[in-house]
Image: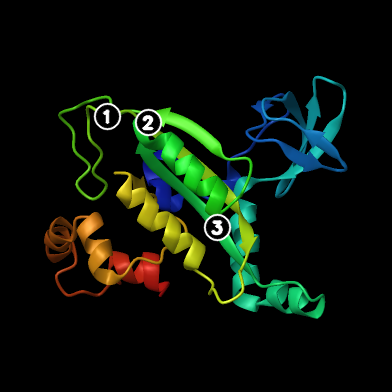
Amino acid sequence: MALRLGGLSDLDLLSVPLPAGTEITTRVDREHEGALRPQGAVGRVVATDGESVEVSFLDGKRGRYLRSEVYFKIIAASRRSGFVDRWDAVRGRPQREFVIQDIEVPVGRLAEFLAFFDAEVGISPVWLCPLRQRNPEHRWDLYVLRPDETYVNVGFWSSVAVRPGAAVGDVNRAIEVEVERLGGRKSLYSSAYYPVDDFWRIYNGQTYEQLRKRYDPDARLLDLYDKCVSGR
């Protein structure tokens, strides 16, 4: 209760335990310890060790997994150090671009997006989750979705080889353009490559500026573009 009352900013993700007996379901197909563990496999947590959990599945096999927030720590460290790029260069492999995103498109345009994604990106599998705004009277001013529209969240978290003549960011930017063309939105937890004018047009810059003048009139904090796109 104290954690809830203290607010999300006070919450240490690693302090939230997954006690033995917690039931889990795998979200995607993934090779693990030399075997394919399919999407939808059911198991229970049998042990925890800091940043990892050990799971016993119904088929009797066990697997050890890192907690999801650890993945983002690893990605951030890799980007800061440049180690993976240097190691790939030593092995004669092309540089890679991280493509870690969640987007929403109207369900009627999903097939178009998946066709584009398969041809231009090629990451597999992807996460699909339908969603719809429950209360049409509510409005998320900085992330506007139509209340009468069913959307599908598409999640993908991997990397792709940078093609000859291309630059890091080209694939992510192509996804952003396609999502906008299809009337969708992209979550801003991941890398973003929007030009500044496009960013503020999509994410309702006028309303954001009103909020910022109210709560940060002296501009002591970085704005949304600086944090999400410029990476400052």
Asked if marks 3 and 1 touch (Cβ < 8 Å), the reply is no
Mark 3 lies on a secondary structure that is strand
Question: Which residue position holds label 2?
Answer: 107
Q: Which of marks 3 and 1 is nearer the N terminus?
A: 3
Q: Earlier in the sequence, mark 3 or mark 2?
A: 3
Left or right of 125 on screen, residue 108: left
Question: Which residue position holds label 1?
Answer: 149
Left or right of 136 on screen, residue 123: right
Q: Which residue lies furthest to the top in this view?
A: 58
Look at the image and tell me whether residue 1 can be seen: no
Q: What residue type is labelled 3?
A: Val
Look at the image and tell me whether residue 219 can be seen: yes
The image's mark for residue 99 is: 3
Q: Earlier in the sequence, mark 2 or mark 1?
A: 2
Q: What residue is shown at x 15% (from left), y 58% (from top)?
A: 211
Image height of 24 relative to 68, above or below: above
The image's mark for residue 140 is: none
Residue situated in front as seen by the camera: 12 or 190: 190
Asked if marks 3 and 2 touch (Cβ < 8 Å), the reply is no
Quadrant in the picture for the N terminus? top left
Residue 35 on image: x %, y %:
85, 37
- Tell me the colour scheme of the image: rainbow
Dividing the picture into quarters, in which one does residue 195 lie? bottom left
Q: How many labels does the image show?
A: 3
Q: How crowded is mark 1: few (under 14 residues within 10 Å), some or many (20 or more)?
A: some
Residue situated in front as seen by the camera: 229 or 90: 90
Residue 12 on image: x %, y %:
53, 50
Mark 2 lies on a secondary structure that is helix
Disc 2 from disc 1: Cα separation: 8 Å
